[in-house]
Amino acid sequence: MDDLREKYLNAIAGAGDEASLEELRVAAVGKKGEVALQMRELGKMSPEERQVMGPKLNALKDEINAALAAKKSALEDAALDERLKAEWLDVTLPPRPSQQGTIHPVSQVTEEVTAILADMGFSVAEGPQIETDWYNFDALNIPGHHPARTEMDTFYMHRLEGDNRPPHVLRTHTSPVQIRSMQKQGAPIRVIAPGRVYRADYDQTHTPMFHQVEGLAIDKDISMANLKWVLEEFFSAFFGTKVKTRFRASHFPFTEPSAEVDIQCSWEGGTVKVGEGDGWLEVLGSGMVHPKVLEAGGIDPDEWQGFAFGMGIDRMAMLKYGIPDLRAFFDSDLRWLRHYGFAALDVPTLHGGLNR
């Protein structure tokens, strides 16, 4: 056994690759290897000899296996060293520049508006962007002769000859979502409906597609005072300063009474500063929901009443972040987006802050 030990330990130490090491393993401790043959000889020995030789053979087998494992590990390490030398890389070099995306101001302001109004108990409702004429106009008490229903202002969907389905339009406001929400949930209800809307207009302050958010609250004792409180609290949170509001009597087919809402501001060097000064800036329309609109939503106007308001998300973004031209929102100019965009992790929350 001493000869076997010396023979194989020397051979294992001198093995130059894993293939020759595997040959030595088979020759030494394989099923037909020399150590296995010595194990078979134990049956021919006396019990006293087996007690001596058995442990020695097992110890020899373990020693050879340990030497094989150690040599295999050493060969693997040497192969890795050679590969690393061939694949040399300077890890101190600066990384390649990576393009980082930014959050569009419209998406950011939508999240800001949602966070503020959600804290007041408003949930988010959504609806289709292609609406029937009934949801977009009739259910909102907009008569057939109203200028908004002309093709000069509204995008109508083309119908093939013989198509008897009701006319469809690209929704001109998110107010149809209010009707769908009332039909689905009934009263009381408190929802906001942010989303894309479409109108046939295009200049510095108008685009064919833009974004709105509508608010709706219906209960048994809601009044214009509740509406004023909600709007003042919203503007103060949105602009990060106390903001006063002013209501001016107006007319909308879907609210009665109706009011345009102005916010306090000052004008200095062509810059608008909200929450200070003695100037006023119109920002949204609002009012108490018209009884016919409540009826269209399946709600009894003799038992329930509520308020509604709607504002342009794009214009709120322009006002808050000093963006001068509405058209730039949709020009796909990466330079503009890198300048006005928001970091992906810059998520607006009331406790974490809404302002950069």
Image (cartoon, rainbow, N blue to C red):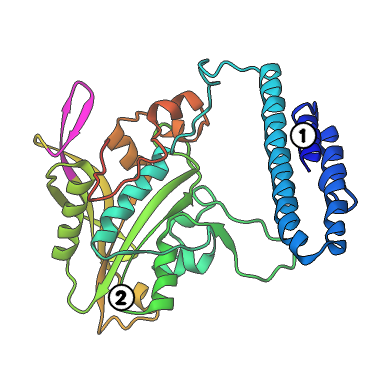
Task: Look at mark 1 in the image and give the residue it sits on.
Answer: 6
Q: Is residue 127 magenta?
A: no
Residue 291, label in figure: 2
The residue depicted at 21 percent of the width and 31 percent of the height is: 272
Name the amino acid type tagged 1: Glu
Rendering coords of residue 174 (x, y %): 42, 58
Q: Is residue 142 visible?
A: no
Considering the image in quadrants, where does the N terminus appear? top right
* Element class at badge 1: helix
Considering the image in quadrants, where does the C terminus appear? top left
Q: Which residues are magenta?
A: 263-275
Rendering coords of residue 348 (x, y %): 31, 46
Q: Is residue 265 magenta?
A: yes
Left or right: where 355 falls relative to 129: left
The residue depicted at 24 percent of the width and 44 percent of the height is: 353
Left or right: where 26 falls relative to 302: right
Q: Nearer the viewer, residue 181 or 53?
A: 53
In the depicted structure, whether residue 135 falls above or below residue 304: above
